[in-house]
Amino acid sequence: MVSLTAPYVSGFLAFREVPFLLELVQQLREKEPGLMPQVLLVDGNGVLHHRGFGVACHLGVLTDLPCVGVAKKLLQVDGLENNALHKEKIRLLQTRGDSFPLLGDSGTVLGMPTGQPSPSLSQALRSHDRSTRPLYISVGHKMSLEAAVRLTCCCCRFRIPEPVRQADICSREHIRKSLGLPRPPTPRSPTQRPVACPRGDSGESSGEVPSPQRQADRTAPGGRRSTAQCQVG
DNA sequence: GCGACAG
DNA sequence: ATCTTGTCGC
């Protein structure tokens, strides 16, 4: 268990969570180097960020590991807006793997279309056939956007890539146990449905690095969870 | 009152 | 993130 002290401030997520994530990676390096992931899926943004340096970049630099930013909501920066046009583009994402580029005003680019070469850095991705809401993938560290999008999609059994999802589930369970709280009901959300995985290739292997976090303010809202993950390409 | 708001 | 309410699919 850890206790987060820094408050959550949009644009400064890394300053709240990175110290704990970094500590976990370092512990892994020291105690279980064989389990060191080749890449981290980070719950948050990479270069899709106010200053082009979100938590996925932050963690990537500090760990020297390839990192992918996997956000569940669009961070509206650099002119990017979750407006009608954006929603229409989302609507046009038909199947798993479909994506479109997120182009910021700065021209510096934050995204590009799947498969097409361009200096883009982030994309809205339909991660699952049965999920309407996209994921917002951005380069974190040492990875191309194309690879980041493909990897993320390959990790999705449901909307949220399994490494992130499992870290989330496991950390919540850990907190629940440690607090002796009653079981939260299993919500039948209209969002996620059990469907098939991407591919059934033989050479599959994936490790998981749950990174539980928490905060312990009495009245303050915001029980925390996990973030980083790994996956073999 | 309204929009923003990674987690 | 968390919380509610409502809908739909299995």
Image (cartoon, coloured by chain):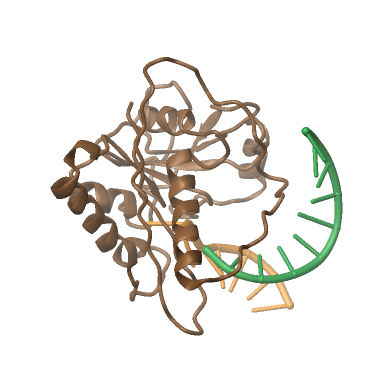
Chain colours: A brown, B orange, C green
Toward the top, the furthest residue is A202
Q: Residue furthest bottom?
A: A219
Could you say which is closer to the camera, residue A180 or residue A141?
A: A180
Identify whether A187 is placed above or below A144.
Answer: below
Q: Position of residue A109 (x, y in %)?
A: 39, 40
Residue A74 visible in the shown view: yes
Q: Residue furthest left?
A: A30
Please give the count of numbered marks on the rendered protein. 0
* Residue A180 image point, x, y percent: 52, 71
A133 on left or right of A62: right
Q: Nearer the viewer, residue A205 or A226?
A: A205
Using the image, determine if residue A229 lies above or below residue A150: below
A142 lies above or below A8 = above
Residue A35, quarter of the rendered image:
top left
Residue A186 placed where, x, y %? 67, 54
- Quadrant in which the C terminus of chain A appears: top left
Q: Position of residue A214 (x, y in %)?
A: 40, 68
Image point 65% across, 35% down: which residue? A194
A24 to A10, vertically: above or below: above
Query: As rendered, which of A144 and A24 lies closer to the eye?
Result: A24
- Determine the residue positioned at 32% across, 29% down: A232
